Image (spheres, helix red, strand yellow):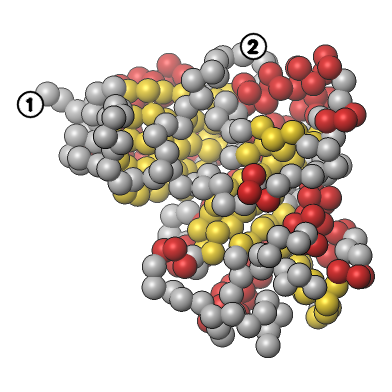
């Protein structure tokens, strides 16, 4: 029996791919506490957690079933692996275990407190060999409700971690003060108007709020825009730009514009996504991108009672809303 437990894996369809969550957050935000809850909770799931340093997690010995070099197996079936040398190498080793007939329900990758999670997202987009086995489920960012405002002022990493998130965990709510917390909420909304915010104390978050969220799967979503979001006057160099185009787009012209944009500005594009209406297709097309890596995938039929329109969200540094909007407008299909 291997360290992940002896289960059988069926490889036939995309549903057999293992969902991956990237868990990030600044130093002291409560990320490690949340990892401990995932690893030791009585949730009935087999979860592999890849951390930077096993020693930093501080797992209680009563939860440990076995230690083996850089792997710790927990009594509830979860496993904790060290990815300090090469996260890609650890993921490929998990693929080897899967081929041997073992199975787990989810993978959680912890980043360091100063990490930029976009670099990990790229492992699962484009032509990555990992895409045959893993599907990126989302990025979860833990934010310190007490120190978050001052951290955002001092550290760009905090802003980038918030900007790229699919879910934001606002932790240590019991310590937060009203005025700084209101400012923090406003800044978070300006950086990332589409990510839901889950409030927590001591990182006590239901697993369903952070796992299986489908952050990189827009096929079942009617819209990616928050109707209550609006522009805020935060002076950050990281901004969010939302665009809606009612007219169908020309696929070739849009892709040409997007590829030119990515080639020139990809380093500043932290995250971009969209539900697109192309004149050449009766169905939706899904856009997902991180920095220089982007992909367009089929999105299934449009909702029967929904409008066929394109919605895009760009999050990045020094983005110019008028330039992005003009690029999309210039991609509109010409009337025949």
Location of residue 197 with respect to 113 vertically, above or below? above
Location of residue 274 with respect to 77 vertically, above or below? above
Q: Is residue 171 left or right of residue 298?
A: right
Residue lying at 86% horizontally and 69% vertically, measured from the top left: 63
Judge whether residue 147 can be spotted in this image: no
Residue lying at 42% horizontally and 31% vertically, measured from the top left: 223
Percent x, y for residue 138?
57, 48
Percent x, y for residue 139?
62, 46
Give the quadrant of the C terminus: top left
Q: Which residue is mark 2?
A: 233
Q: Is residue 166 left or right of residue 150?
A: left
Location of residue 107 with respect to 269 vertically, above or below? below
Percent x, y for residue 45?
66, 64
Observer-nearest residue: 64 or 92? 64
Residue lying at 80% horizontally and 62% vertically, measured from the top left: 40
Observer-nearest residue: 265 or 95? 95
Q: Name the secondary structure under disc 1.
A: loop
Give the quadrant of the N terminus: bottom right
Observer-nearest residue: 321 or 44? 44
Residue 336's disc is 1
């Amino acid at each position: 029996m291997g360290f992940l437990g002896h289960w059988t894996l069926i490889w036939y369809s995309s549903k057999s791919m293992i969902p991956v969550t990237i868990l990030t957050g600044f130093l002291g935000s409560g990320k490690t506490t949340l990892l401990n809850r995932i690893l030791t909770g009585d949730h009935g799931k087999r979860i592999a957690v890849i951390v930077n340093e096993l020693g930093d997690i501080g797992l209680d010995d009563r939860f440990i079933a076995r230690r083996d070099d850089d792997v710790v197996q927990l009594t509830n079936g979860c496993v904790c692996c060290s990815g300090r040398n090469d996260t890609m190498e650890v993921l490929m080793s998990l693929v080897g275990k899967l081929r041997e007939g073992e199975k787990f329900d989810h993978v959680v990758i912890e980043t360091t407190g100063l990490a930029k999670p976009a670099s990990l997202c790229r492992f699962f987009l484009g032509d990555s060999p990992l895409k045959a086995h893993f599907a990126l489920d989302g990025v979860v960012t833990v934010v310190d409700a007490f120190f978050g405002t001052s951290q955002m002022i001092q550290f760009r990493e905090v802003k980038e971690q918030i900007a790229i998130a699919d879910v934001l965990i606002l932790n240590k709510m019991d310590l937060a003060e009203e005025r700084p917390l209101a400012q923090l909420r406003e800044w978070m909304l300006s950086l990332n108007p589409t990510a839901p915010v889950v409030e927590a104390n001591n990182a006590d978050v239901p697993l369903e709020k952070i796992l299986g969220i489908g952050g990189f799967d827009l096929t079942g979503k009617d819209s990616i825009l928050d109707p209550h979001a609006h522009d805020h006057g935060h002076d950050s160099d990281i901004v969010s730009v939302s665009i809606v185009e009612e007219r169908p787009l020309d696929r070739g012209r849009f892709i040409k514009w997007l590829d030119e944009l990515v080639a020139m500005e990809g380093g500043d594009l932290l995250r971009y996504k969209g539900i697109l209406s192309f004149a050449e297709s009766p169905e939706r097309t899904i856009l997902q991108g991180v920095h220089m890596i982007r992909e367009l995938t089929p999105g299934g039929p449009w909702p029967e009672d929904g409008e066929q329109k394109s919605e895009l969200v760009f999050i990045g540094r020094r983005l110019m809303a008028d330039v992005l909007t003009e690029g999309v407008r210039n991609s509109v299909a010409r009337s025949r």
